[in-house]
Image (tube, rainbow, N blue to C red):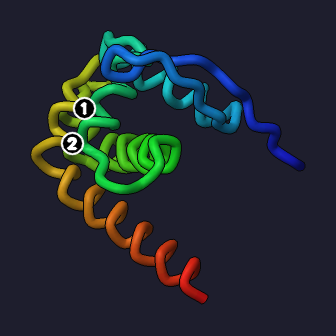
């Protein structure tokens, strides 16, 4: 099954930009926003602020995966109480370092691949 990318406009740090993501990623991002009581623009701005050299869409995909990985742990379930949670804030404490390492690894891998 081929996945078609969907283009949407978002405001990131006060600037309007467009992003292309898979429909499942847009759905997951919407779910994160619903759970956290935040807008897509706010979450995208936070991810943009934390990313280094990676593309915003790549950083957003990594964030979405990490968000649900953290939420799927026993600690994540306990914190969530299977309702609204502070998972985004807990990512800055527990998972953000891993997320940053993954982004740096992705950038190193991409740079090596581009050098070939």
Q: Residue at x 89, y 49 (%)?
A: 1
Label 2: state its secondary structure: helix
Q: Furthest-bottom residue in view?
A: 116
Q: Secondary structure at mark 1?
A: helix
| Residue tagged 2 | 91
Q: Name which residue lies at 21% across and 50% down.
A: 96
Determine whether, in the image, residue 56 is placed left or right of residue 24: left
What residue is disc 1 on? 88
Q: Are marks 2 and 1 in contact (CB under 8 Å)?
A: yes
The residue that appears at 20% across and 45% down in the rendered structure is 75
Q: Tell which of 116 and 40 is nearer to you.
A: 116
Q: Position of residue 51 (x, y in %)?
A: 30, 47
In which image quadrant can residue 67 be found?
A: top left
Looking at the picture, how far across and down is residue 115, in whole percent?
54, 84
Residue 81 located left or right of residue 62 = left
Q: Residue at the right extreme? A: 1
In this view of the protein, can residue 64 be seen by the observer?
yes
Q: Seen in the image, is 17 located left or right of residue 70?
A: right
Residue 19 in the image: state x and y as whole percent. 59, 31
- Asked whether 89 or 43 is in front, the reply is 43
Residue 13, horizontal then vertical, whole percent: 31, 21
**Mark 2 Cα within 10 Å, few/some/many (few <14, many 20+)?**
some
| Residue 83 visible, this orientation | no
Q: Residue at x 25, y 32 (%)?
A: 88
The circle on residue 68 is none
Quarter of the picture holding the C terminus: bottom right
Q: Nearer the viewer, residue 69 or 74?
A: 69
Q: Is 58 placed above or below 106 here?
A: above
* Crowd rating for badge 1 (residues with CA inside 10 Å; few <14, some 14–19, many 20+): many
| Rendering quarter of residue 113 | bottom right
Residue closer to the observer: 23 or 44 = 44
């Amino acid at each position: 099954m081929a996945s078609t990318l969907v283009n949407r406009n978002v405001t990131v740090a006060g600037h309007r930009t467009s992003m292309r993501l898979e429909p499942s990623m847009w759905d997951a991002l919407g779910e994160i926003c619903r759970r956290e009581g935040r807008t897509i623009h706010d979450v995208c701005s936070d991810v943009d602020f934390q990313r280094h050299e990676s593309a915003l869409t790549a950083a957003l995909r990594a964030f979405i995966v990490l968000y649900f990985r953290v939420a799927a742990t026993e600690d994540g379930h306990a914190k969530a109480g299977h309702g609204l949670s502070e998972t985004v804030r807990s990512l800055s404490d527990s998972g953000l370092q891993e997320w940053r390492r993954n982004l740096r690894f992705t950038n190193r891998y991409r740079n090596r691949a581009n050098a070939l």
